[in-house]
């Protein structure tokens, strides 16, 4: 798994993958291990609202906020997808990590996360039921969808345009195992 990173310590890392693949979890663990600042694209993509994850922020505002935050730190890890709005950040990445796990594991994680976040509100009749159901249906399409939504195909196209090293972790494993893989190459 030699990515030819040389002797330079990697200090700007982007982690992406399907919802439920563990991008945020890995980013938080790596940020703690490396003492880097962690940012998540959802914090820039979505406007905080009474019903979370329903009001997208305008692209220019997302870019401006993220750019401002990244400039404050020499070392950072950014988790989440930038496809469709974040190409301006590509030149800043020193390493991109792509995560993939089988759909059944991802969806199980997402359902569990939805229950933890929203409790009975995602049950039939709950005020989050429809939104949660739509989100899970959307996430189930990741492996097979074309580029019209965030999909494996869209991520592969986006990854093919990068000039920095790409580390692919494409199986289910513990967070610690993933951290060890990353630490072994940086």
Image: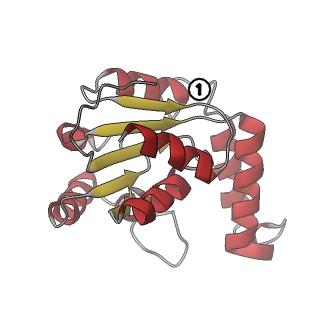
Q: Residue at x 32, y 63 (%)?
A: 36
In the image, residue 133 above or below residue 69: above
Q: Where, by quadrant of the figure, is residue 125 drawn? A: bottom right
Q: Where, by quadrant of the figure, is residue 14 drawn? A: top left
Q: Where, by quadrant of the figure, is residue 143 drawn? A: top right
Query: What is the number of callouts on the image?
Result: 1
The x, y position of residue 57, in whole percent, is 33, 60
Residue 147, can we see it?
no
- Would residue 150 appear left or right of 88 to someone viewing this image? right
Residue 114, can we see it?
yes
Q: Which residue carries the number 1 mark?
A: 145
In the image, residue 137 above or below residue 41: above
In the image, residue 90 above or below residue 145: below
* Residue that extends furthest to the bottom in the rendered view of this protein: 50
The x, y position of residue 104, in whole percent, is 78, 39
- Would residue 99 appear left or right of 132 to someone viewing this image? left
The x, y position of residue 161, in whole percent, is 29, 23
Q: Residue at x 37, y 60 (%)?
A: 34
Q: Residue at x 39, y 64 (%)?
A: 43
Label 1 crowd bin: few (<14), some (14–19), many (20+), radius 10 Å: some
């Amino acid at each position: 798994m030699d990515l030819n990173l040389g002797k330079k310590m990697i200090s700007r890392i982007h982690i992406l993958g399907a919802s439920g693949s563990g991008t945020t979890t890995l980013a938080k663990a790596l940020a703690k291990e490396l003492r880097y600042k962690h940012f998540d694209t959802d914090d820039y993509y979505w406007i905080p609202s009474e019903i979370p994850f329903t009001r997208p922020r305008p692209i220019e505002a997302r870019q401006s906020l993220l750019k401002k935050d990244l400039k404050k730190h020499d070392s950072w890890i950014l988790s989440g997808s930038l496809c469709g709005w974040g190409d301006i950040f590509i030149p800043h990445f020193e390493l991109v990590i792509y995560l993939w796990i089988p759909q059944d594991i991802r969806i199980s994680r997402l359902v569990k996360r939805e229950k933890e976040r929203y409790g009975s509100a995602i049950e039939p009749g709950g005020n989050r039921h429809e939104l949660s159901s739509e989100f899970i249906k959307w996430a189930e399409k990741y492996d097979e969808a074309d580029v019209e939504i965030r999909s494996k195909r869209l991520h592969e196209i986006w990854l093919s345009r990068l000039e920095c090293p790409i580390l692919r972790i494409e199986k289910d494993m513990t967070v610690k195992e993933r951290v060890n893989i990353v630490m072994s190459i940086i």
